[in-house]
Amino acid sequence: MAIHENLLGGPPPTHLPDDPRPRELLAAGSSPAEVAAQHPTSSLAWARLADDAFERGSVVESYAYARTGYHRGLDALRRSGWKGHGPVPWEHEPNRGFLRALHALARAAQAIGEKEEYERCAQFLRDSSPTAADVLG
């Protein structure tokens, strides 16, 4: 038996490659819009834009930003070997941008009355990372 064999029979966790620059820029106070313009593949920047828009009450804008971050994250997951299901651990910091965008998409979908999309995204978040679902609410 291999040491790294998954005894539960599911796919192995997906760990996105680290791109620390967007995270560093955001932590240093750069605006999410500036970071998204400089790093358009950063799900974290799009998730932060979605959060800011939601907090301002701009729910449709939040939905659009979250959807962009979500799709950028799906692209990155697929490039990292993800096959459409399996764990995307919150504990691996580079995964957090995608998970935050997924959460923001669920939240915005719920706010605009897209019940099916809300339920799908909320379940996807729980299936991908129960920790993220707990942390993000």
Image: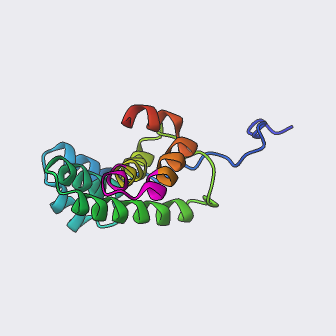
Residue at position x 12%, y 46% in the image: 29
| Quadrant position of residue 41 | bottom left
Return the residue nearer the eye: 94 or 100: 100
Q: Is residue 116 left or right of residue 104?
A: right
Return the residue nearer the eye: 109 or 124: 109
Residue at position x 24%, y 62% in the image: 60
The total number of labels drawn is: 0
Colour mode?
rainbow
Return the residue nearer the eye: 81 or 57: 57
Residue at position x 57%, y 50% in the image: 14
**Eyeballing the image, is 107 above or below 76?**
above
Q: Which residues are magenta?
A: 107-118
Q: Main secondary structure of the magenta part?
A: helix
Identify the residue at the far right of this view. 1
Q: Position of residue 128 (x, y in %)?
A: 55, 45
Q: Position of residue 106 (x, y in %)?
A: 40, 51
The N terminus is located in which quarter?
top right
Q: Is residue 2 left or right of residue 85?
A: right
Residue at position x 29%, y 67% in the image: 40
Q: Indicate yes or no whether the magenta region holds residue 61.
A: no
**Eyeballing the image, is 40 above or below 23?**
below
The C terminus is located in which quarter?
top left
Q: Position of residue 46 (x, y in %)?
A: 29, 58
Q: Position of residue 76 (x, y in %)?
A: 48, 62
Q: Is residue 53 left or right of residue 8?
A: left
